[in-house]
Image: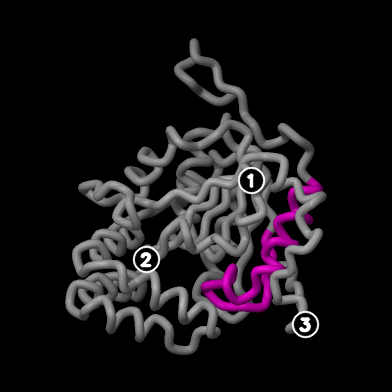
Amino acid sequence: MWQMTTDSDQDKALHTDGAFGTSRLVHCPSFWIHGAGMSGTTWGALTSMLPLAQTPDLPWHGSAAKIVPPTVEAFADYLSPKLPSGTVLIGHSLGGMVAMELAARWPEKIEALVLIESVPTARGGLAKWVTGGVARLFVRTIPPHWLAWLSGLGQEEDARLEMKTQLMRHTKTSLAAIMDAAVAYDGRNRLAQIKAPTLIIVGHQNRATHGGAQYASDHIPAATLIALAGGHMLYKDNPAQVLRAIDDFLASVPPGAGVVHTDAANGGEAQ
């Protein structure tokens, strides 16, 4: 089904001494889109040594605008002017949904795409509809500090602290807007339009994303799917292996391989 990469506890520690000198991420632009309830600062440990990395805030997060209605498509519209040409586009969870939308609609800007613990839709069947409805009600009902505590249950220590710190900055209104965007999105029809070489990474311990990730891998033309030890907050649980997986993937992507040229006279259609 996919490649499972194992690692030792020592491998999970993020060692930066000399680790980035040959990394392609040092020498090309990268655009890191965080997940629901987080902010661009969540990527700090992974991007601090990457001079061309951008870590924007999604709408309704951090200092970004509060876009109404909140949708993944509108979030992509908001970020698209900031997206550099020839970028490695990386998204986690909700940020992965936005990254799929960007990669499908602005293929001429994307060198490669990396999706971490992300699925193309939270829809699909009565069970998922009920789950989405309950989640929407949940975030509208309980205070953010309770949600921060509940979300951290069962998480690794770094992930738990990150979720607590980030979610405490939100209000019920912002969390409800974010949940609305995530639950409403259906990007399945976008997958075949993604032309960039794509790496999809799931956390082995979080089986909730495995089916959706497999679907994305089956429908994105040039996709590779792997599993790493960790949960939904995989980039916190296992940062070194996440970076190593991205580096190994990029080493196999020829420069310019993912960039699709558009023809302005053809209405911007990919060629």
Q: CA distance from mark 1 to mark 3?
A: 29 Å
Name the foreground residue: 71 vs 28.
28
Which structural element holds mark 2? loop
Mark 2 belongs to which amino acid?
A: Gly
Above or below 16: residue 193? above
Percent from the top left, x then y, of residue 70? Answer: 26, 51
| Secondary structure of residue under mark 3 | loop
Query: Is residue 228 magenta-colored?
Result: yes
Q: Amino acid at mark 3?
A: Ser
Which mark is first along the chain, 2 or 1? 2
Q: Residue furthest front?
A: 17
Give the left or right position of residue 56, taking residue 142 as reference.
right
Residue at mark 2: 37
The residue carrying mark 3 is 8
Instruction: Decide which of tag 1 and tag 3 comes sooner along the chain.
Output: 3
- Residue 215 in the image: x percent, y percent? 56, 60
Residue range (magenta): 225-252
Residue 51 tag number: 1
